[in-house]
Structures are given as structure tokens and as C-alpha cells.
Amino acid sequence: MENKNNVTEFILHGLTQDKTVAKVCFSLFLVFYATIILGNLFIIITIKTSEQLNSPMYFFLSYLSVVDISYSTVTAPKLIYDLLVEKKTISFVGCIAQVFAGHFFGCTDIFLLTVMAYDRCVAICKPLRYTSTVNKHVCGWLVAASWVGGFVHSVVQTLLMIQLPFCGPNEIDHYFCDVHPLLKLACTDTYIIGVSVAANSGVISLSCFVVLVVSYAVILVSLRTRSSEGCLKALYTCTSHITVVVLFFGPCIFIYMRPSTTFSADKMVSVFYTVVTPMLNPLIYTLRNEEVKNAMKKLWSRKV
């Protein structure tokens, strides 16, 4: 494929074309993004400064918060800014960079959620072996593997996009650059690349989702033999994890488990995994977790 590129920038249609709706969305998403940054930062600081939150689950949660901040920052600031401007543009290099960063942090998020499910499965089903199985060394390797896996996935997606020729039009019916909208603009047959993209992103999303479902199914079966108090505590923890998984993986599977086609609903669905889930994670993990709430209260009282 000869790479002939006449496009130096792309025009984004944004989330909405209605100016009144755009102003409302600006205020709404500004609050959402501030909540993402402050909420996740508060979780990171609480975990790092609390002596009680030293288990592997909180180690993974702190890195999940780092990824959530990074992932939302890839799209949210540009989305918020574009809601106030008439012409929404992004350079070709900026567009490719957004594809790379979005898939890097998004895929790392997926792997971290899968690792957290494995951690809960071992902790609840094999409690006597937990400290030896999921030790600090193993935790470090699991987090590193998540970052490396996200990086490899992102490099593959980016290389597939870079080789495409874009000769016009250059309008993207979305609020950020992603693989499917770019495939739609390429002036060549993208069927093979579309299948490769679906195989790369879709298979990762679906396979990790299946692993997560199986892990939590094993946990729920194991809880039947526990005391009511221990069962309730474990159930609260798992419920928060499952909520995050459904909110994040549902939209991801909808977007990426299909060939290079785009739907009008894609923009609204994408909001869930780029903005809503990173915003809800701090609320879900703190409001349903007494240990985190108590640690936050102690941290707040010390600051006061």
C-alpha cells in the first residue's frame, strides 16, 4: 500500500452541534473531569499514606487510579475545549498520538481490572495461600505486564493507522480520534485492516471480560460456604469490582467487537469508558469499602 497523505489535520464534529446543548455539556464535563482528577488523586494519596491499606488489592487500585487519570486526560480536555469553539480541529500527528495514548491507557486499564479480579479470586477462594501467591514481587510483575500489554496493543493499532493513506475528506464524526472513524476516512480498501483492528481490540476486550466473569463466578460459588459476615464483606468488594467491569467492558465490546463500521450512538457509548467510568471508579471503590472510607477520614482529620 502506497502511503499518500494529503491530510494535515482532521475536523472533529464533536459531541454535539447544538450550541445550547454544548454549553450545558461544557459545564457538565468540566465537573466530571475535575471529579476524575481529584477523586483518583485522593485515592492514590490515601493508599500511599495509609498503613492499613497495604494489601495487593489497594496496590492495584492505586495504579488503576493513575491509569484512569491518564486515560480520561487523553480525550476529556480536548472534548471540553471543543464544546466552546466553532471549528474543532486536530493535527494529523495529534490524531495519531491520541489513538496511541487512548489505546495504551485503555488496554492497560483492561489488564489491571483483570489482574484485580485474579487478586480477589485468590484472596477469597485460597485465603491461606494468598500472601505467598500474591506477594509484592508478583504484584509488581502483574502491574508491569499490564503496562507492557497495553503498550504492545497500542503500538499495533497505531502502526495499522499510520500506513493508511488519507486524501480527503478529513471530517471525523466523533469527539476524538479512534481507529474506526479513521478507517472510514482512508482512501483505500480497509477490510483487512478493519478485521485486524477488531481482532486486536475486540479479542482483548472479550477475552478479558470472559476471564473476569469466570473469576467472579468462582468467587460467588466459593462464598456459599462462608459465614454470613465474611460473605457479606467479600460480596460488597466484588460488587464494586463487577460494577466497574460492566460499565467499562460493555461499551468497549460494543465499539471494538465489530468490523470497521461506525454508528451514530458511538459517541455517546464512548463517553462511558472515556469519562463516566474513570469518574465513577473513586466513588464505587470508596463508598462501598469501609477500609478506604476510614483511611480517608483519618487522612482528612490529619490535614485539618
Image (spheres, rainbow, N blue to C red):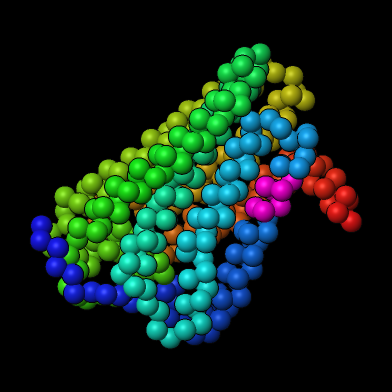
**Quarter that holds the N terminus:** bottom left
Q: Is residue 250 magenta?
A: no
Q: Who's the residue at 52% across and 69% down the image?
A: 77
Judge whether 214 appears above or below 111 on screen.
Answer: above
Q: Is residue 96 left or right of residue 83?
A: left
| Magenta-drawn stretch, dominant element (helix, strand or loop) | helix
Q: Position of residue 51 (x, y in %)?
A: 78, 35
Quarter location, residue 61:
top right
Q: Residue furthest left?
A: 2
Q: Position of residue 269 (x, y in %)?
A: 44, 59
Marker count (numbered): 0
Judge whether 277 appears above or below 59 on screen.
Answer: below
Q: Who's the residue at 55% across and 52% down the image?
A: 68
Q: Residue furthest top?
A: 128
Q: Position of residue 35 (x, y in %)?
A: 65, 61
Q: Is residue 98 left or right of residue 159?
A: right
Is residue 264 among the parts visible in the rendering? no
Q: Which residues are magenta?
A: 40-46
**Quarter that holds the C terminus:** bottom right
Judge whether 241 appears above or below 304 on screen.
Answer: above
Quarter location, residue 167:
bottom left
Q: Who's the residue at 58% across and 49% down the image?
A: 66
Quarter location, residue 255:
bottom left
Is residue 177 among the parts visible in the rendering? yes
Q: Is residue 278 left or right of residue 85?
A: right
Q: Position of residue 143 (x, y in %)?
A: 52, 36
Q: Who's the residue at 66% across and 37% down the image?
A: 58
